[in-house]
Image (cartoon, rainbow, N blue to C red):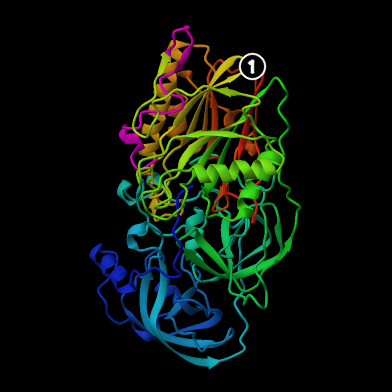
Amino acid sequence: MPWIPARPLRSPVTVGAVVAAALAAGLLAAPGSATAAEVRIHDIQGGTRISPLAGKKVADVPGTVTAIRAFGSSRGFWVQDAKPDRDQATSEGIFVFTGSKTPAVTVGDSVLVSGRAAEYYPGGASAGLQSVTEIIQPEWTIVSSGNPLPAAFRLNSSTVPDRYAPTAQDAPTAQDADGGSIEALPLRPRSYALDRYESLEGMRTQVSDARVVGASSEFNELWVTAEPHRNRTERGGTLYASYRDQNGGRVKVASLIPFAERPFPKADVGDELDGITAGPLDYDQFGGYELQATALGERHDNGLEREKTRKQAESELSVATYNVENLSPKDSTAKFERLAEAVVANLASPDVIALEEVQDDNGPTNDKVVSAGDTLKKLTAAIAAAGGPSYSWRQIDPADDQDGGQPGGNIRVAFLFNPERVSFTDVAGGDATTPVTPVRGEDGEVTLSANPGRIDPANQAWQNSRKPLAARFTFRGEPVFVVANHFNSKGGDQGLDSRFQPPARTSETQRIAQATAVNSWVKSLLALDPKAGVVVAGDINDFDFSPALKTLTSDGALTDLVTRLPRNERYGYVFNGNSQVLDHVLTSPAIRRADYDIVHINAEFADQASDHDPQVLRIRP
């Protein structure tokens, strides 16, 4: 999981700076005035993503107030023209930005608005996101009140196109897309989902009986789909299974209804919002197009349950991976208890557990502390108290502030193991900077130069990222090598809804290099013993169809077990309404008889102990 700081309600980037940047890029005309009699909302919105009037003053723009945002530093109201034109590409709605002042209007007011047309980029112009066309520095006159609202546009499988965004083949020149900005391209709402949403920016929009595909968050948001049958997972989510199919029906839902009047629903994936959910369509820097609900459907609980995997047989070795999300002694006792309960009840007390995101002993306090003994002691004690085994642990402290993650947290991977089921022989020499290598021991068996030890820690592939930890365990007299991983995050990548299409995945380069290093290390071990049992597990931070996973599995050194699951079960993480796989378990050719399970206990639920689902592998004799 990428570390994400607390989010502001409004980006500090000024509208003036955005307009200046757009002027410099040649996207806007120089500021001036537009003839008041000619200007309606669809004239401001225009037929592309950038207003043809951005930077210009507009006067007496007519519209009906459809919704009001009366909180935070991004207050204002939405207006929509009751007399639309016939061009589907031009939105009839717009946001009137009043800053920190609550606007003195009422839903249903017919108003004439004057101000300046502008483009606002949530997150800043350099973030690569879409812009929101607004009227800033507004003044308005209320003409009448109590007017009916324009009918809401219905989002469904018929109105949301299958194709997500323009590509180079659809652009006038390859420069306009294929990784370039699509802002200047004419909107084609019947052809592309992103264009459909942009053509509805600021307009009343609705979904009916919408299935939840991203659980409610602490920010009182959730994700629904307008295409309930598209790429449906076995538990009611929407599967992200290809770069070619981004699931365009996903829409985020927030609420403009006062909490005291209507608390935001706590919904899990697979639940439904029965009835109509409607409001103006906005754009948000943390997820793209967002329906700001003035009418919110009733939550229908579809009874999603947390899974439990079966207990390993006496003759089976079980290996699990679990991202415990920045775990430190500063976390609540309740979090430790929930993680412990999951290990015992949901994962059936695996023999070996590869943990990711174990923080140091004082968590995000940014000092020289790097040890994690207190963190692991508290976790293993909680597991024992929950009725699990008395786990031992092994890990290597990182160099201070060198492994990325939350500043000061010094996250690392670590192993828990049940000494009643597996044995571990320590070999000195493993530290933050010394590489571990497979070697042949005096008895002829393949072992490790240090146990545990870090794989190629000086490699630039691991800069500001967690280093893999390799260890040799023995189960029923047979060695098994386990590598715990936490590859670099997707932080810095452009979002699926970016104005640059296709979006750049800049973080991918480092993961490919990391995959190359792990793949090479595994092949060096297999060169010494082709029959060695090797398990590579952890948070790879990438999809089963990604170049990083293709690199990890190259030359047949490893098999990604996710690919052996039915297609609708290949996920353990939910991001922006897409159910996807980031965590993986991979095995060497010698491990032929294996039972693999992604145990869904977190990612689909509003109430989470971690944002990742754990995984369990059972190796059969």
Residue 399, x across and y down, in percent: 35, 41
Residue 259 visible in the picture: yes
Residue 501, x across and y down, in percent: 40, 49
Residue carrying label 1: 476
**Residue at the location (47% across, 19% down)?**
557
**Residue at the location (39% across, 56% down)?**
499
Q: Quadrant of the C terminus?
A: top right
- In this picture, residue 495 sits left or right of residue 612: left
| 446 is within the stretch colored magenta | yes
Who is closer to the viewer here, 103 or 144?
Answer: 103
Who is closer to the viewer here, 421 or 562?
Answer: 421
| Quarter of image, res 299 | bottom right
- In this picture, residue 547 sits left or right of residue 339: left
Disc 1 residue type (three-letter): Arg
User: What span is in magenta?
Assistant: 440-465
| 106 is within the stretch colored magenta | no
